[in-house]
Image (cartoon, rainbow, N blue to C red):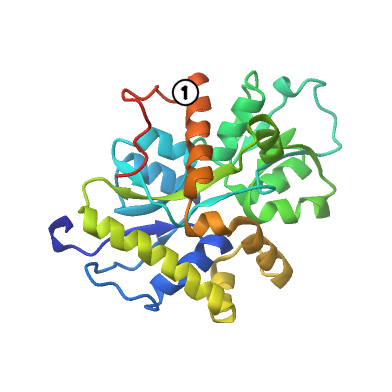
């Protein structure tokens, strides 16, 4: 596989990813055909950009970014962040701002994040966007650097502490519009990898998650080492919100949600329409 080089892997430092990948990163899951390099942890937008350049063999991605790299990467059935009641939030503060949302300066956590795509679908006329790392957005809104922000990850549990309010739950808007869960992030593998390698890794991600589910306390120190928030309740809430049955296997409903997101993106001009009858998500 891949000239016998160790398989490179990247995922975010957020609790849902470190929880899912703890078993793989710490040798709790046996690998038979794969030698795994030390995983790289970085912000999801950094991983999105690296995928555009084909840097990693297997990587966490925003589903928005996946739509741009389907020629290079295929989707895994395991490891996704997809569900209900877990979407990005559009938040604002009490400082004066234009009356119409389309005129607001809005911070987004990366151009290729699903959060940015959902904002575009929800309010297509918004044009004044500021790209920031997700952990910087709450402060920027609170200090009036921007009029509003789209927040993800742990931020959705802490924004009210800054006196901010939710203008629109973009995940709720998506669910109301489509009747489907919201696809946020996924694990994707290079199409150049051997089928047997990708199949084993897909199964290994699910096995790693099952190990963490059976041994949650063993993962705690690793999760907190990388998390932006250290409070136990916030970390547990984060994992409980983003890790679910779809993380073990997307299933038919999960795949339908992903295809709906990509289809709406294509209709909005974000992606090109697929040349074939389907999106070719999997190998």
Name the residue: 67% across, 37% down.
Answer: 175
Q: Single out the residue that lies furthest toward the front.
A: 252
Residue 249 spot, x, y in % from top left: 47, 55
Q: In this view, does 276 lie to the left or right of 186?
A: left
Name the residue: 57% across, 63% down.
Answer: 15
Q: Name the residue under label 1.
A: 266
Q: Is residue 64 left or right of residue 93?
A: left
Q: 238 and 112: which one is in front?
A: 238
Q: In this view, does 187 lie above or below 273?
A: below
Residue 14 visible: no
Residue 44 spot, x, y in % from top left: 49, 49
* Quarter of the image where one finds residue 58: bottom left
Q: Is residue 190 left or right of residue 255?
A: left
Q: Is residue 236 left or right of residue 197?
A: right
* Quarter of the image where one finds residue 217: bottom right
Label 1's element? helix
**Which quadrant does the C terminus fall into?**
top left
Q: 129 and 238: which one is in front?
A: 238
């Amino acid at each position: 596989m891949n000239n016998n080089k160790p398989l490179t892997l990247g995922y975010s430092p957020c609790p849902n990813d470190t929880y899912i990948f703890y078993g793989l990163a710490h040798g709790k899951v046996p690998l038979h055909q794969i030698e795994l390099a030390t995983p790289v942890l970085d912000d999801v937008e950094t991983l999105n950009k690296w995928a555009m350049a084909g840097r990693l063999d297997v990587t966490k991605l925003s589903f928005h970014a996946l739509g741009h790299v389907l020629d290079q990467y295929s989707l895994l059935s395991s490891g996704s962040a997809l569900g209900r009641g877990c979407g990005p939030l559009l938040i604002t503060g009490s400082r004066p701002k234009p009356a119409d949302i389309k005129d607001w300066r809005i911070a987004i956590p990366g151009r290729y994040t699903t959060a940015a795509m959902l904002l575009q679908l929800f309010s297509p006329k918004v044009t004044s966007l500021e790209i920031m790392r997700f952990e910087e957005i709450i402060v920027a809104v609170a200090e009036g650097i921007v009029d509003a922000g789209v927040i993800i990850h742990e931020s959705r549990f802490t924004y009210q502490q800054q006196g901010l309010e939710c203008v629109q739950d973009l995940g709720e808007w998506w669910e109301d519009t489509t009747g489907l869960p919201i696809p946020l992030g996924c694990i994707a593998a290079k199409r150049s990898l051997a089928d047997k390698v990708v199949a084993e890794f897909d199964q290994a991600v699910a096995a790693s998650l099952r190990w963490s589910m059976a041994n949650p306390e063993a993962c705690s120190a690793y999760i907190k080492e990388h998390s932006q928030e250290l409070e136990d309740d916030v970390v547990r809430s984060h994992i409980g919100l983003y890790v679910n049955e779809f993380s073990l296997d997307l299933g038919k409903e999960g795949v339908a949600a992903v295809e709906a997101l990509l289809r709406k993106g294509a209709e909005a001009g974000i992606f090109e329409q697929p040349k074939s009858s389907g999106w070719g998500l999997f190998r």
